[in-house]
Image (cartoon, grey):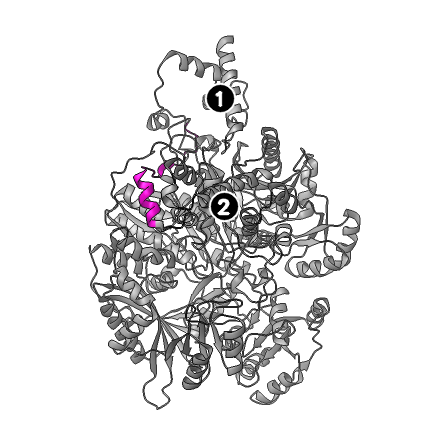
Amino acid sequence: MALTGRIARQLKHELLQHSKQRAPQAYRRTFVQTARPTSDKPSSAHRQQVRSFAKTTMVLAAAPQVAPNAQAYLASGAVGTSQKKVDVKKVLVIGSGGLAIGQAGEFDYSGSQALKALKEEGVTSILINPNIATIQTAHVLADEVYYLPVTPEYVTYVIEKERPDGIFLSFGGQTALNLGVKMDEMGIFERYGVQVLGTSTKTLKTSEDRELFANALNEINIPIAESIAVGTIDDALQAAETVGYPVIIRAAYALGGLGSGFADNADELRDLSARSLTLSPQILVEKSLKGWKEAEYEVVRDAADNCITVCNMENFDPLGVHTGDSIVVSPSQTFSDEEYHMLRTASIKIVRHLGVVGECNVQYALQPDGLDYRVIEVNARLSRSSALASKATGYPLAYTAAKIGLGYDLPNLPNAVTRTTTANFEPSLDYIVTKIPRWDLAKFQNVDRSIGSSMKSVGEVMAIGRTFEESFQKAIRQVDPKYDGVQGDHFEDLDEVLKNPTDRRWLAVGQAMMHEGYSVDRVHELSKIDRWFLYKIQNIVDCTHELEAIGSLFGVKKELMLKAKKMGFSDKQIAKAVNCKEDEVRARRKNFGIRPWVKKIDTLAAEFPADTNYLYTTYNASTHDVTFNDHGIIVLGSGVYRIGSSVEFDWCAVNATLSLKDLGKKTVMINYNPETYSTDFDVPDRLYFEELSYERVMDIYELETASGVVVSVGGQLPQNIALRLQETGKAKVLGTDPKDIDKAEDRQQFSQILDSIGVDQPAWKELTSYEEARKFADDVSYPVLVRPSYVLSGAAMTVIRTPDELEEKLLAASNVSPDHPVVITKFIEGAQEIDVDAVAHHGNLLIHAVSEHIEQAGVHSGDASLVLPPSSLPKETLDRCKDIAKKVAKAWNITGPFNMQIICAENPEGGESLLKVIECNLRASRSFPFSSKVLGTNFIDVATRALLDKDVPEPVDLMEQKRDYVAVKVPQFSWTRLAGADPYLGVEMSSTGEMACFGKDLIEAYWTAMQSTMNFRMPNPGEGLLFGGDTATSDLGTIVDYLKPLGYKLYAANQEVKQHLESASKDGSVSVEVIEFPKQDKRKLREVFQKYDIRGVFNLAKRRASSMVDEDYVMRRNAVDFGVPLFMEPKTAVLFAQCMSEKLPKGDGIPSEVRRWSEFIGGKPL
């Protein structure tokens, strides 16, 4: 026995040494802390949980090992599946609403998991979530759906109507958590007998209220950053004196670090705390630990006190950058075993003490050169990191948390992914995951590009590799295909960016090391990024220089090619270094026999056989983990969420996959976005967590010998490689021929085809000099829409109204030349825009939907409010739109989904209105989920059948059917996050998400939809409203006429607006007060807002502001910063004023818009 004990110890020692040497560091397997049974005798279940090392080694010595059998294991009764303690029949799940910065698709994913768990248990689920773009809000997962605002008022109506006996609050992000705490305080759950499942509201409150949280951790001697909770600016200044500068401010009950920031002195603190206190009632002043390492642990605990840490993550960026804006690796790479276990033990202690039931996330600051640490915060709900952790480890956190909420405990839950173990195990990984955020700050003017404690990124990517270098370079390319891997960029002041991070910081590190010859130590001194990561980047830099030194492809031998591929170099990256074409590198690499290997996400680090379909490719391997006999159809996902391409394309990709399965096809999904439902383990038959590049898609296509690839459901990324997949890669692209897709993307060909089929379009020209541009603009008359192909600063597309603006745009802000032509289009003022979503089969139209925009043309369709069925378009216009769709489908021989944008303008010569096509995409569009869910027909299902030529339905005109409801889709903006950006709508898209609500008419639907926007607070009669903007139109006067009878106090910032409002109103009885309006002192302006109780701002400016002291810009920007509803677009502002006049004051009883989705559309067709 002593001998076997020694063997075990020796084995353990060698394993430890080995794991210390190599990255990725697999977690040292930690035996699960199980709650001790009450009796002295261990129960049989408990005995099975304890593994005896000695016995194992004896077996090792005695017999050849037989792989454990998953089915036999489950059949043995080790995992009891019959246990369910909480008695609920109907559960209300609170969704997170529209996607916003700080609260995006990860909550759509976790909510979907919770609904899946309820369905398995046979519990009826009621979902309240106005986000129409997501997979969650369909009857595939939820039994009933309410598209309503996630507010205490509407949720109470739903509770009154549905009478659920349980509610889940931890799957809808901060929105659901704040709502739950508030409703609990109002006594609503108690009144209706609704049980909060999982973590209690008391625990939620403790984790969110900074003071309660600090007290709770002090009770168990866990160190937290020294902090003082305050409610006023003066108290904040006093607290900072006590704690000592520099300080960080955090807001309670806020998501994604909203309202937080660093202050080095009293002046900075005064401004920062003033802003934070408008967003949250309580703020925390704490000592800044900038430069410390940051780590997170994901912890799961059940009601029986079983507790495990599922995943730990380490930030590449030191403390000071919000974890949502940090590059993150998992598992941690630079922690010693002691540090890892110290933080793990603390996590379990905290979660037990707080009484979390379900999933929880603990964030730490760790001293870089000692064992000192601080707890930063605890999220007692599913967080952004839990979606990442679930995908990184293959442990379904949200699903497990939902089952725990229903009363299961961990030893009795089978792990849904591996199917060979219970949920009571800690994953250990034999790979490394890198997450990199995606920012879209360049889309906004005046925006502050620095990143700090408040999150600004709109999405994130996750890459899997066997080394940090491989994983890191894959992730960089996933963020944007324009990047090849580690590279540099031009910086005015490189050291400044290394010291004070912006969204381009990783490029600054690349520039410093790749091109400026900075040493690892110098970059570390400036950036405080751990040297371990910098040495790994140095390896990539050295390999790049080695390739460049050879200078030709034929000089690259097999060893070097393999070395580069193992470090995550793409073929294109190698081609660039040795001055050749990507296809030549691919050919040479394949000649050398160098191909990627396919590995499973093996959460058991090969200790047990893991049966998963989560796959990734790597060059750091020598065998495949799977066989390739399926010949499935590959569906290309939409990649990272960014402005312009978000969860709606994930809805399309998931539905295409489900439809293919229904049609009996094997499916392969390629996508790398951890926040999505499409990258969940049970959606496709095989999931590749991989790049959507030509190289990787072809690798997988060839390995799988796939029978086809779908490029029309993942937005623009798959479209961009479609032609190359077919022409160079000889892949079978399903649906519309990529050559035809190319004809729609190329403006010249697109235009010629429209002319040939008699479809009108606005006058346009591609020009190569400023003089030509000026002449064309004079010919067609201003305004014109200008799109330079090369932009130096500002938004790419702009509406230009005068010759001076044209000169400024084309000579100062961009470069116009034969190499960089500019496209100028006649812009039609005051026109209405129409969206057509459609599906065709061999050029014949199958189904179509026609939605109208509320806003005038000139607002990007992604930022516009869509109405379906249209409420103002005459039948003949609908018929003409259908006719155009038929002609377009035939001309491009479309098979699959397509979308058109049409402008409807008055005919200057009288007669029927002019319909002009401004854009056509031969793929699914952003509005496909909206059209499908409103009309009760799954457009993607019809499209998938068309792609396969199988069970294709007969053409049907959905617009002919009379409907007694209307739905409105409205945009969700994230202006609050984007400090300095001008909240103004133009031709460039700026919204991050969308919501839709139904109603009996346009007023009811729009009224509800606007209240669904995040943190919207309705101005109550008697409060103040501030007006500003363009006095040349009658819109402001119309708004005042609607609102005056309600008793609002009306204010203006100048005499001109006051006189306009008073003279433009119908009966001349309106009185408007001019108030002081300090444009350069934010603090004074806030006091003005408070003094006059301004709770709503209507600012209808004619154009975007040109300076930071423009009165309209200051009014718009500060309305957003002070958390006041802002109406800045004329049509929607007038419509909402009309809604207020009809809907306020509110009546008694449940309002008529509170109806199930299935009641509106008459059944559950989706």
Under circle 2, the secondary element is strand
Vertical relation: 628 (above or below) 17: below
In this rendered view, identify the residue nearer to me: 599 or 592.
592
Residue 604 on the magenta span: yes
Q: In screen coordinates, is 1118 left or right of 555?
A: right
Picture coordinates of residue 1126 (x, y %)? 57, 70
Picture coordinates of residue 76 (x, y %)? 36, 24
List the residue tagged with mark 2: 435
How many numbered badges does the structure rendering display? Answer: 2
In this rendered view, identify the residue nearer to me: 250 or 295.
295
Q: Is residue 382 visible?
A: no
Q: Is residue 878 visible?
A: yes
Q: Amino acid at mark 1?
A: Val
Residue 742 on the magenta span: no
Q: In screen coordinates, is 959 left or right of 528?
A: left
Q: Amino acid at mark 2?
A: Lys
Picture coordinates of residue 583 (x, y %)? 33, 49
Q: Earlier in the sequence, mark 1 or mark 2?
A: 1
Vertical relation: 1014 (above or below) 1067: above
Picture coordinates of residue 1164 (x, y %)? 33, 57
The quarter of the picture where the C terminus appears is bottom left
Cα gap from disc 1 to disc 2, whole angstroms: 35 Å
Instruction: Tell me the crowding category of disc 1: few under 14, some 14 to 19, or many 20 or more residues within 10 angstroms, Cα based.
Output: few
In this rendered view, identify the residue nearer to me: 941 or 57.
57
Find the magenta span and give its range: 583-606
In this rendered view, identify the residue nearer to me: 1004 or 670.
670
Vertical relation: 1140 (above or below) 392: below
List the residue tagged with mark 1: 50
Vertical relation: 811 (above or below) 735: below
**Quarter assignment of residue 1111:** bottom right
Q: In screen coordinates, is 686 left or right of 444?
A: left
